[in-house]
Image (cartoon, rainbow, N blue to C red):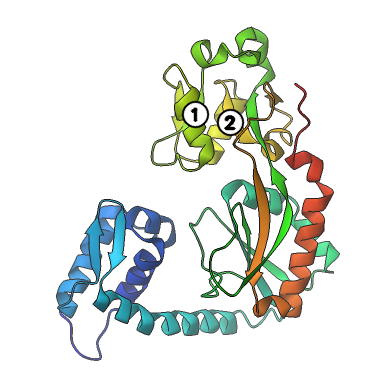
Amino acid sequence: MPFEYGKINWDDIRLFLAIAKAGGLSAAIPETGLSAPTLNRRISEFERALGVQLFERKAKGYTLTGAGQDLLEQVEPMAEHARKIGLWREGLDPRPRVRIACGYWTGVYIARNLAALQNSMDGAVRIDILSGAGFLNLSRREADLAVRNVLPSQQGLARRRIGRVDFALYAAPTYLDSHPDARTPQRAKTCDWVVPTPAAATGVSARWLSQHLERPASITCDTPHALLESACAGAGLCVLPCFVGEGDVRLQRCSETIEGLGHTQWLVSHDISRKERPIRRVAAALYDLFARDLALFMAPDTV
């Protein structure tokens, strides 16, 4: 892309911002909808056109160079203006919008209870669920609220404990009936397992599987939804958050809660914007929702 002053391909700016926020090509795929090779080609062309290197390519991801950091500081206000233009375009709906960042399964849980959330606020607020899109920075106002399993380390963020999430093993009743070992420690050696692919294997549950399985997995899945549906179809055992497994009538729990996998859930917000009435109302409604289903998130230790 030949670079001329005043003639910038704004799409290249968008891709640069996505990679900078995600910290790498693969992590930027959901945001951009482009493949890693295409992203690499586009950002390399952008660097050549600018005549500067924007990223250091490392095995663990992309980090910004000094020039890249300078450009990011110029681009972030543009992204905020673009967001405001989007809000202006949506002006036919006068209701304020609140964006909730969360993990995939928490996003499914909130979506299933969205009607109750909206009703508790008389439908006065629009809610965006941003799940499985990588880490969103509340300090940069990329989201208004976040449900997280770790305490935030950034300054200027407030948090409130909203409960605990436990994990256990689940399988279809038909599989459990035909595989008695599924309810015993022998399952690690004799049962079929449904696990995430290496690219999708993030978090403590994936590490637990790698440490405890004593045979190759029968099925690997690159999305949480595919993993759930495979287990429900009788393909084998899987590790799930208890609020997912207990909430699906197609599954039965076949273990006690797994020690070391459980974590505290935190509702995180920006220390300033959390005082805005729409965000405050959604935060209160979310807290009440999680409190209502506390027993679902921490399944009793009986099988």
Vertical position of residue 114 compared to residue 168: above or below? below
The residue type indicated by label 2 comes to Val
- Residue at position x 69%, y 75% in the image: 274
Decide if residue 95 is in sight here. no
Task: Using the rendered view, name the quadrant where residue 270 is placed.
Answer: bottom right
Task: Using the rendered view, name the quadrant where residue 269 is placed.
Answer: bottom right
- Residue at position x 75%, y 60% in the image: 286
Q: Which residue is mark 1?
A: 209
Q: Residues within 10 Å of mark 1 (few under 14, many from 20)?
A: some
The front one of 272 and 14 is 272
x and y, in percent, of residue 122 in the image: 84, 69
Quarter of the image with the C terminus in it: top right
The front one of 77 and 81 is 77
Is there a contact, CB below 8 Å, between mark 1 and mark 2? Answer: yes
- Residue at position x 51%, y 64% in the image: 136
x and y, in percent, of residue 167 in the image: 64, 35
Q: Which residue is mark 2?
A: 239
The front one of 120 and 157 is 157
Mark 1 to mark 2 CA distance (whole Å): 8 Å
- Numbered disc in front, either 1 or 2: 1
x and y, in percent, of residue 15 in the image: 34, 68
Helix, strand, or loop for circle 2? strand
The residue type indicated by label 1 comes to Leu
